[in-house]
Image (cartoon, rainbow, N blue to C red):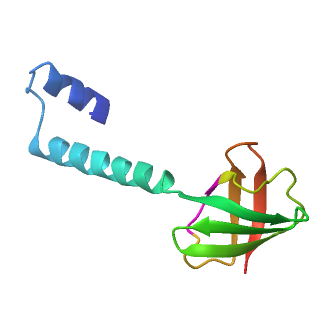
């Protein structure tokens, strides 16, 4: 029985064919799905404090002001722009951020 079929039976009040094992599997699947969605959506935001020659960016994050260097060039990243990082900047070697104003994706080295 699929998780969808199991949930449909429970919502319709039809408990025949619903075993303890199928309930256990459905609950574990649901918890795993929720954890996966939470980890995918776990992003970190920042504000650009300074942009230097489309190569270096000083960004205020929850960890303080951090300097990032573009792997190539990142055009149209401006002071005051909000960015969102794909991974935490707590301890990083490289990362990717997206400028929420211009939708520019920038691959950077963490300094």
Q: How far from the left and from the top, in percent, is residue 3?
A: 29, 35
Which span of residues is magenta-colored? 83-88
Residue at position x 41%, y 52% in the image: 38
Asked if residue 2 shows in the view, the reply is no
Looking at the picture, does residue 10 appear above or below residue 76?
above
Q: Quadrant of residue 15?
A: top left
Task: Name the side, left or right, on which 13 lies relative to 79.
Answer: left
Q: Residue at x 80, y 54 (%)?
A: 77
Q: If the image is split into quadrants, where does the C terminus sit?
A: bottom right
Q: Is 85 included in the stretch rendered in magenta?
A: yes
For this view, does 12 lie left or right of residue 103? left
- Residue 95 spot, x, y in % from top left: 68, 67
Residue 10 against residue 104 in the figure, above or below = above
Q: Residue at x 16, y 23 (%)?
A: 11
- Quarter occupied by residue 92: bottom right
Question: Which of these two is toward me, 16 or 91?
Answer: 91
């Amino acid at each position: 029985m699929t998780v969808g079929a199991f949930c449909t039976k429970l919502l319709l009040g039809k408990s025949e064919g619903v075993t303890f094992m199928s309930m256990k599997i459905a609950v574990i699947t649901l918890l795993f799905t929720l954890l996966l969605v939470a980890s995918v959506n776990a992003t970190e935001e920042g504000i650009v404090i300074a942009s230097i020659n489309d190569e270096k960016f000083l960004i205020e994050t929850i960890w303080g002001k951090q300097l990032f260097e573009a792997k190539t060039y990142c055009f149209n990243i401006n002071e005051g722009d909000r960015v969102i990082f794909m991974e935490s900047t707590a301890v990083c070697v490289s990362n990717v951020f997206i400028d929420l104003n211009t939708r520019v994706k920038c691959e950077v080295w963490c300094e």
